[in-house]
Image (spheres, rainbow, N blue to C red):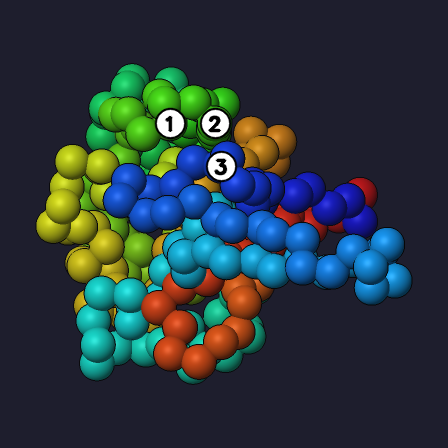
Amino acid sequence: MRVIDLTQTISADMPVYPGTEPPNLQVANTYEKDGFRETQISFYSHTGTHMDAPFHLFGDRTKLEELPAAQFVGKALVIDCRDVEEGGIIGMERIEAVRELADQAEFLLFCTGWDANWGQETYFGAYPVVSMEICQYLLDSGKKGVGFDVIGIDPIADGGLTRHKMLLSQKDIVIIENLTNLDQIGGLFTFAALPLKYRDADGAPVRAVALLEE
């Protein structure tokens, strides 16, 4: 089995959503003083490659820790959208082109190639986003989750978080953002994105991987 890491590394100088603070990784114990090293880590719950729970936007919806672990693992398909122009809309025709596989998948992961901008100001620019029709397909087909190699399912300019709200208000679906390396995968594969488990979780960083049969 081959394992491909789909996770961005958390660091003090990483991109964070506008308006939030970057992570703080401070050495708390040292080999010289304490005989071991330990790091005190502080970051927002939606830092780096992370997962949104319905509770992220709706106080009466499901918290991340309330979802079963099976929600975070399943059959996935990468939808290649690297030819979509900057600021473009990813339409339902992308799903229709691979409909049989898409219907089988429990997760759809959209590869825009935007992760090439990670660490640059352009990462916060006009990345492609999925259409509302695709959001409806995700709900109707009972997907466990949807993932992207951009900072959000909604455009940065959409303060109303239209797509987030459409998905998270209706189903126990998770949204995974800031993925990477999606261009290395084709066909159906096993996907796992395991979040930190803490009380009253609206979201959490994940270690996302693709498990490929040799």
Q: Which amino acid type is shown beneath numbered disc 2?
A: Gly
Residue placed most toward the observer, 130 or 58: 58
- Tell me where residue 193 sits by quadrant: bottom right
Q: CA distance from mark 2 to mark 3?
A: 6 Å
Q: Whole-percent x and y of residue 70?
A: 55, 73
- Label 3 or label 1, whichever lies nearer to me, is 3
Q: What is the total number of numbered labels drawn onto the structure image?
A: 3
**Nearer the observer, 87 or 29:** 29
Mark 2, Cα crowd under 10 Å, few <14 / some 14-19 / many 20+, is few
At 73% across and 46% down in the image, what residue appears?
3
Q: Amino acid at mark 3?
A: Met
Looking at the picture, does residue 71 appear above or below residue 98?
A: below
Residue ID at (25%, 77%): 61
Look at the image and tell me whether residue 181 can be seen: yes
**Which residue: 25% across, 25% down?**
126
| Residue at the front extreme, as displayed | 33
Image spot of residue 107 (x, y percent): 46, 54
Disc 1 marks a residue whose amino acid type is: Tyr
Task: Locate residue 208 relative to residue 115 in the image: left or right.
Answer: right
Q: Horizontal and vertical percent for residue 112?
A: 41, 29
138 above or below 110?
below
Reading the image, the residue beneath label 3 is 14
Helix, strand or loop at mark 3: loop
Number of the label disc, if any, that sits on residue 119: 2
Instruction: Report the residue at 18% width, 59% height from top.
Output: 165
> Which of 82 and 106 lies nearest the eye of the viewer?
82
Q: CA distance from mark 2 to mark 1?
A: 7 Å
* C-beta proximity under 8 Å, tags 2 and 1: yes
Q: Are marks 2 and 3 in contact (CB under 8 Å)?
A: yes
**Which residue position holds label 1?**
123
